[in-house]
Amino acid sequence: MSNSNNISDSTVDVVLIGAGIMSATLGVMLKELQPDMSIQIFERLDTVAAESSDAMNNAGTGHSAFCELNYTPQRKDGTIEITKAIKIAEQFELSKEFWAYLVEQNYVGPPQTFINKTPHMSFVWGDNNVEYLRKRHEALVKHHFFKGMLYSDDQSQIKQWVPLIMDGRNEGDKVSATFMDIGTDVNFGSLTRSLIDKLKQKPNVSLHLNHEVDDVKRNKENTWSIKVSDKINGTTRKLNAKFVFVGAGGGALHLLQKSGIPESKGFGGFPVSGQWLVCNNPAVVAQHNAKVYGKASVGSPPMSVPHLDTRMIDGKKSLLFGPYAGFSTRFLKKGSLLDLFKSIKPNNILPLLAVGRDNMALTKYLIGQVMQSPADRLKALQEYFPAAKNEDWDLDIAGQRVQIIKKDAKRTGVLEFGTEVVTSADGSISALLGASPGASTSVPIMIELISRCFKAQGSSNAWQEKFKQMIPSFGRSLSDNETLADETRARTSKALGLQ
């Protein structure tokens, strides 16, 4: 997809809208696959990775399904469904393979700047939850992705793993936990900045900050006309692109709708905001070294699953609790209060109304979260850290998430908790909608996008071989091949400093 002589200088091969982890991953992959490809990146803010990819806006867990209980629901017969957990674990292994390649190729700096080994734990209390976690552990350890996961309902053992969790807890409380030593913490903001810093040094790549894409329209020759405003000097320009990726986080829905592609019809968005409690006491931070996830409240969205979370942010160890969910009509943290209303179209009004009808528990939950007092937030924290003191914690604003609303034959509309790539029939434009697990699965998402949008090149021997260089397990199943999975984990752990 390189420029040909009969195409004007204003036509580029690829336009990436939004300078977050998704655009960065896709841009790097495409440039590795075809070095002469021309790429322009447009970001509405004055810096890279300032919305969903930023460390304080993103859960940062390195989602591998080790600790997230919403990926392993309990069936009506009491057994545990682990299919989604296996899929997400495999996707994260692919992401680690690509990141290992980037480290080896000096595309990024030391791996510790963006990924660090941090145990992943699940923690629950009460008879029913303890029994659920026991069954979950029993089901997961049968698969090789989860071998090595430990389980305990012994308070003294759990105290060895996470002293803060047990400090001040009643000896008679029935609790249990699982412990996975090979979990990770990922700073997607740091990773994104490294990728884009390197990418913009490549030939035929340009990054435009403070530039907002106002419109995306199809040309007669099936390229795309992009209208861009320079927010600093107020000028507007247009350029043509052969391929457009809309990776603008919550802002992706509006641009997808403006594209007018049939595949965009019926999609809506449900925004959910969030807040963290951030520990300001170094002595407390030093006592905790794990990501501890609990069970979500009834009606809560998956990314609002409470967790007491060790993070490495800009080289400093931090401790966060939350996120506390909330509601805002903004689709971006630095967006407009009119975002939700502007997204309502004749083709998505029925799915939006249906989701409102069918998700009263979610609505009630969000209202309750918005109404929380500092005492309420502290009480929620003390369920995980009984000895927590209010003065040791500051409130910080987390990122904005926009959950997918889509047409559904049975219920008219359904609220999806995940990520979805919406692509035109000819593969010339693609947009990423949704939230968790999001950034952690950016690599497999982009591999799938390239296979759909660059079919001819993607199936060529040259691109296939390059994919195998970037992701050595490419084309093979890690979930079905234990030996391959073990070899892959050993190799990436060494490259990423995770032993």
Image (cartoon, rainbow, N blue to C red):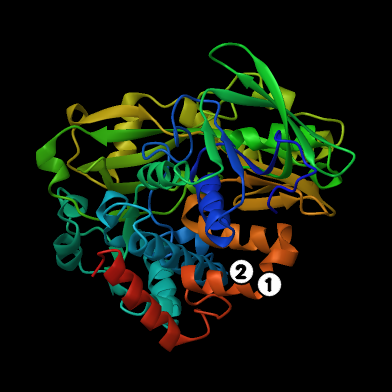
Label 1 close to label 2 by CB (< 8 Å): yes
Using the image as rendered, state which of residue 486 and residue 454 is in the foreground: 454
Residue 291 appears left or right of 485:
left
Q: Quadrant of residue 78?
A: bottom right
Q: Quadrant of residue 215?
A: top right
Identify residue for label 2.
Answer: 463
**Residue placed at 42% from the left, 33% from the top?**
398
Using the image as rendered, state which of residue 281 and residue 428 is in the foreground: 428
At label 1, the amino acid type is Ser
Q: In x, y percent, where is residue 45?
A: 50, 25
Q: Quadrant of residue 238?
A: top right
Residue extending farthest to the top is: 233
**Residue placed at 45% from the left, 60% from the top?**
69
Circle 1 crowding by C-alpha within 10 Å: few under 14, some 14–19, many from 20: few
At label 2, the amino acid type is Trp
Residue 456 appears left or right of 69:
right
